[in-house]
Every structure is written in structure tokens, then in C-alpha cells.
Amino acid sequence: MSQLVIDLKKDLKRFKADEHMLGFAGFSLAIAPDRSLDGVLKIASESREGGGGYLTLTIIVDTCSDAAACADVERMLGRLGRPQAPLSLGPGFDYAEPFAPILDDGGALYMGELTLFFKTLDGLEKVIVRRLVLPALEKALAIAFEPVSWWDEQG
């Protein structure tokens, strides 16, 4: 019998490359009063028939291979999208899939996703991200975002 070898990191990179990238933003996540970790928020969108759609937020945090920091990040981000920690995202917001880790291999990076569904999204993605999503994340977490670099505005 032949053995099938699957490279999960390679498959993940290929899968993420197919998303409709909107932009990205650096951030600083405070995991303790005297300690912050740097990371990147990748924002992708998908529109659906009828004007609705969803935003997929891929959150990548540099944990510096620190197991305790990784556990803190997972605990903090793991609350996102759960009923006990709702995000206030306006009247067009439909629901959130709970935050889910997608890469935690004990390495220097922790990666997870939060998917937010909206009744109305098509053409409003940047406004929703700027005015609703980022402020809601800042309110829910001890996080400070840098300005978003929009993919369609990159030279």
C-alpha cells in the first residue's frame, strides 16, 4: 500500500491564497499589563447573491515560541464570536462563527480565524471594517491596530 503524505502548512497556504484579499493591518495585542505581542490581521471577503456575504479575519500573532504567551493568546482570541462575548457590529450584522485556531504547531506563530456574516456587505467592506469591525475588536480585546493597508490600493 502506498503512503500519502500531506503537507498541512503547504495546503493551508494554498487555501488561504484563494481568498478575496481586502487588506491587512499590523497590531499590538496586550497579553499582560507589561507585555504585548505583535501580529497581523488579514482581511478577506466573499460576497453572496443578494448583497450579503462574509469577512474572514485571519489573525496571526508572533508568540516567539513562548508556550505561556501562546496559551494567553488562545484564551483571549477564543472568546471572539461566542454568545457570551458578542461583537457589536451594527444592524447589518448576521452572525459570527466562533474564533478557531488554524495553526498552533508550537512554533513562533499562532494563527486563527474569525468569520463574520453580514446581511449587507457587497461594496461596503471597507466601511464595515473601518467603522465596525476594528472598533469592536479593540473593545473586545486589549488590541491596537495600525491603519489598514487595502489590497486594491497597493502599488
Image (cartoon, grey):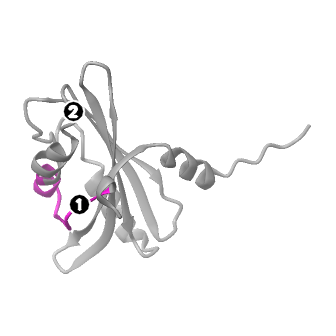
Which x, y percent locates residue 11? 61, 48
Q: Is residue 139 left or right of residue 11?
A: left
Rendered-image quadrant of the N terminus: top right
Q: Magenta region: which residues? A: 135-150
Question: At x 43% / y 69%, what residue is drawn?
Answer: 67
Residue at label 1?
148
Name the residue type under label 1: Val
Name the residue type under label 2: Leu
Question: At x 32% / y 53%, what residue is drawn?
Answer: 152
In this rendering, is residue 136 above or below 141?
above
Which x, y percent locates residue 154? 33, 61
Question: At x 39% / y 51%, what residue is drawn?
Answer: 112
Q: Nearer the viewer, residue 44 or 65?
A: 44
Question: Does the segment drawn in magenta span residue 60?
Answer: no
Residue at label 2?
121
The furthest residue to the top: 50
CB within 8 Å, label 2 to label 1? no
- Mark 2: which secondary structure? loop
Q: CA distance from mark 2 to mark 1?
A: 18 Å
Image quadrant in which you'd find residue 2: top right
